[in-house]
Amino acid sequence: MKSLRWIYYATIALLIAACSSSQSGVGSIFATDTPLPTPKAAVTPAPDEEAAVKAFFEALENDDYEIMYAMLAQSSRDALTLEDFSKRWNDALNTMSASDFDVSILSSTISPFNAEVTYSIVYKTALAGDIQREIVMRMVNEGGEWKVVWDDALILPELAGGNQLAMEYDIPARGDIYDREGLPIATQADAFAFGIQTDQIDFDMVGALTSELGRLCGFDPLGIQSLIDSSGPGWYLPMCEGTRAEAQRLLSINPGGLVIQEYSSRYYFRGGLAPQAVGYTLAISPEQLNQYRRLGYSGSERIGQTGIEQWAEDYLAGKHGGVLRVVSPTGQIVSTLGQSAPEPADSVYLTIDSNLQFHAQAAVEFFRGAIVVMEVETGRILAMASGPDFDPNVFESNNPNNIALNSLLNDARTPLLNRAAQGQLPLGSVFKIITFSAALESGLYLKDTEYDCQYDFTELSDQVRHDWTWQHCQDRIAAGKFCNTTDSTPLTLPFRSASGPRAASSAAARSRLIAIARTIRRPTSSAGIPVASASATIASSGGDANRVGSTNTRYPIRVVESSRPRRSSNSPRYPTTGLVASRSETYIARSWPGRNCNCATR
C-alpha cells in the first residue's frame, strides 16, 4: 500500500517538473491555444426603390417607352412586346387627353427580393379634368436592380382585367375668317367644285363654257379653250370652286361639258383672298397626332397649317368637349371618369379689305413679288399680296378639284411662299430715303433739286446700270419691236384685263391655267354632276343666295375679348400692328411669341 502511495507521489512530481520546464523554454507536450479571426459580414444594400419609380415616370414624361420597357421584369417582358406596351400607354394618354401628369411617392416596403411602392398620380387632361389615383407598383430584384412587374392597373386601377378607355367627343364647328367689313374669307360650308368633262362638251356651246368659266374663275377663255384642245376624251379638267349662287347661275346657262360637284369642307371665297397670309387647313398628320390628341382633339379634325389659320387655331377650333369612360372588353360602360362641355369657336376679323386685296393680287400675280398696303394712321394692313398666289381650296380632301394639289406643291414659282412676309427682297424705292439723305448731307444737292433718272445710269466709272424694265425692253427689241430707251417717261408693262368677279391680268390667268394643265389628267367615271342633270341636286336651300350654304352654326364674336385662356401669361395680350382685328377694329400685332405667323409685316 505504501508502495502505491509513493508511485502516486512520484507521478505528481514528474508532472510538476514538466510544467516547470515548459515555462523555462523547454517544449511542452500540449498545443498552444490560437485565437480565431474576427468574423466579417458583407452587407449588400437593396437598390433604391423610389429612384426606380422616379426613373420610370421620367421616361414616361419623355414618351420614351423603350426605356420604360427595359425597366420591366423579365416575366413581364416575356408576356408583353415593346410595341404592345408602348401602344397601351400612348393610347391611354391620348384617350384621356392627358397633356401632363404629376407623380408623388407616398410609401414603400422592401425585402431582399421584392418591393412595393405606393404612389399618387394626377393626370392633367384637357377634356376630363384632373384624374387622381393612388396606385401600388410591385417590383422584383433582378441582378441588383428593381424591375417593374407590369399590370395595366399601373396606368389606372380601372384598367385591370382588360378594361379600356373611351372618349366621346363633342367638337364645335370651326370659326370663320372675315375681312374688315365682315365679308367672309374662309368658312365651314357647302361649296361647289367646277370642272370640264371633255367627252361631254357641246362644241356648239363651247364658247359659252369657256367664257363663263373664265368669268367665274378669273381665267382667260382662250387659255381654257387651248387646254380643252390639248386634252383627250374622257379627261376631267379642274377649274375652280364657287358658291351655290354661282353654281345656280351656270346651271341656268347650261353649257355642255360643265361638271359641278358639291362638297362640304373649309371654303375660301373668290379662289382664295390673301392665301399665303390666311393660310389653309390640313388633316392632322401622324407626326402631330399625339400632340393634338392630348390637347383634346379626336384626330379627325383639320387644323390650321400656315398663316392666320395656324396662328388663330386656338380661337378657330373652339374648346372641344367630351366624356371619358371605362369600357369592358365586351364594350359595356363600366364607369365615367370625367367630362366637359364644348365651347363655341371664335371667328377672326382681319384688317384686310377684300376688294383692295383682290386687286392687289391681280396686279402682282404675274410677278414673283409682293404688295403690302398699310393704313398710315393706324398701321393696319389693308392688303398683303404675294405673287404668284394659289387657290387654298385645293388642299381640301373633299374637294374633287384637289387633283391640282400635286402641281401646286411642285410649282417652281413657289406660290406657297409669302413673299410679303418671308421673301428676301431688295428695298426698292424705300432705299431712296437713304440716297436722298446722303445727297442732302453732301451739300451738292438742295431739297428742291430735280434729278432726271434716264434709262441708263452712267455716273459710275466702271459700269452702267439699267432701269428695272431693261430686260423687258431688250426682249421687245430682240423680237423686232420698238422700245423707247431714251425717254425718261416710265415704261408701262402691258396688261390686258379680263372681266368678271375674279378678273385678273390675262398673263396671270394663263399662268394659273398652265398650273392646271400640269395636273394629273385622266379619264374619270361619272362622279360629278353633268350640267344637264344638276339642277335638282343643288337646288336652293333658301337664305342668302350670294352666300355659301352652311349647315353649321358659327359665332362671330370679338376675338380679342375672348375670356378663355389661350396661351401662357408670358405672352403679351395686345401687340401693336398687323392683320388681325376684332369687329371694333382693335387690332392684334404681328404674331404671338413662340407662334409661327406667316401673315406678318416685316
Image (cartoon, rainbow, N blue to C red):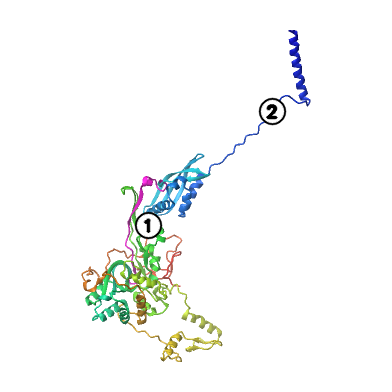
Q: Residue at x 76, y 24 (%)?
A: 22
Q: Position of residue 111 (x, y in %)?
A: 50, 39
Of all residues, the one furthest to the top in this rendering is 1
Is residue 298 toward the left or the right of residue 536 in the image? right
- Above or below, comparing residue 544 to residue 564 in the picture: below
Task: Pick the quarter of the image with the N terminus.
Answer: top right
Q: Position of residue 80 (x, y in %)?
A: 42, 48
- Where residue 127 sits, quadrant-wise, is bottom left
Q: Earlier in the sequence, mark 2 or mark 1?
A: 2
The residue beneath circle 1 is 296
- Above or below, comparing residue 175 to residue 467 in the picture: above
Q: Position of residue 131 (x, y in %)?
A: 39, 49
Amino acid type of the residue tagged 2 in the rendering: Asp
Is residue 37 toward the left or the right of residue 573 in the image? right
- Above or below, comparing residue 315 to residue 379 in the picture: above
Q: Position of residue 57 (x, y in %)?
A: 47, 50
Tally the numbered discs: 2
- Chain part drawn in magenta: 153-181
Q: Secondary structure at mark 1?
A: loop
Amino acid type of the residue tagged 1 in the rendering: Gly
Q: Secondary structure at mark 2?
A: loop
The residue beneath circle 2 is 33
329, 354: nearer the viewer: 329
Q: Crowding at label 1, few (<14), some or many (≥20) Cα neighbours within 10 Å?
A: many
Which label number is shown at residue 75? none
Q: Residue at x 37, y 84 (%)?
A: 495
Of all residues, the one furthest to the right in this rendering is 24
